[in-house]
């Protein structure tokens, strides 16, 4: 799928070791392919099992506890107000 390839390429450019992947329930059907592709790049992937209600609902605390170096948030554009996070957030 074109979008999944785009996501993988955007993640690769950031060279993360540990990624926190978050998306709304309606898009989780594509998560297996994304997780598999990232794991093939030796990236540890942590998938949020929680529902996601928009770009203001970023699970920064969970990503920090898991020592992730990138949050990938799929399905929403960046919130109009910057989310405070020491971890970069990639919106797709």
Image (spheres, rainbow, N blue to C red):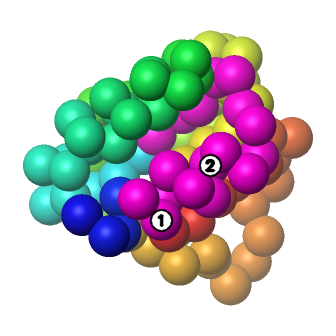
Query: Which residue, given by chain and number where applicable, does mark 2 sit on?
Result: 11
Residue 80 in the image: state x and y as whole percent.
68, 84
Q: Which residues are magenta?
A: 5-21
Q: Earlier in the sequence, mark 1 or mark 2?
A: 1
Residue 56 appears in the figure: no
Taking 45 as reference, is 52 left or right?
left
Q: In the image, what residue occupies the spot 57% across and 56% down? A: 9
Label 2 neighbourhood size at 10 Å, few (<14), some (14-19), many (20+)? some
Residue 4 in the image: state x and y as whole percent.
35, 58
- In what quadrant of the picture does the N terminus appear? bottom left
C-alpha separation, residue under disc 1 versus residue under disc 2? 9 Å
Q: Secondary structure beneath disc 2?
A: helix
On residue 6, the disc is: 1
Residue 24 in the image: state x and y as whole percent.
28, 57
Taking 41 as reference, is 68 left or right?
right
Residue 22 appears in the figure: yes
Residue 7 within the magenta-colored segment of the rendering: yes
Specify the farthest residue to the right.
Answer: 86
Q: In the image, what residue occupies the spot 58% across and 31% down? A: 19
Query: Dots 1 and 2: beta carbons under 8 Å?
Result: no
Q: Where 5 sits versus 28, above or below?
A: below
Taking 85 as reference, is 42 left or right?
left
């Amino acid at each position: 799928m074109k979008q999944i390839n785009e996501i993988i390429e955007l993640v690769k450019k950031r060279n993360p070791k540990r990624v926190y992947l978050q998306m709304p329930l309606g898009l989780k059907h594509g998560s297996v392919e994304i997780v598999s592709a990232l794991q093939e790049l030796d990236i540890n992937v942590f998938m949020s099992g929680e529902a996601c209600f928009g770009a203001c609902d970023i699970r920064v605390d969970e990503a920090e506890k898991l020592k992730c170096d990138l949050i990938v948030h799929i399905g929403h554009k960046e919130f109009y107000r910057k989310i405070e996070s020491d971890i970069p957030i990639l919106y797709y």
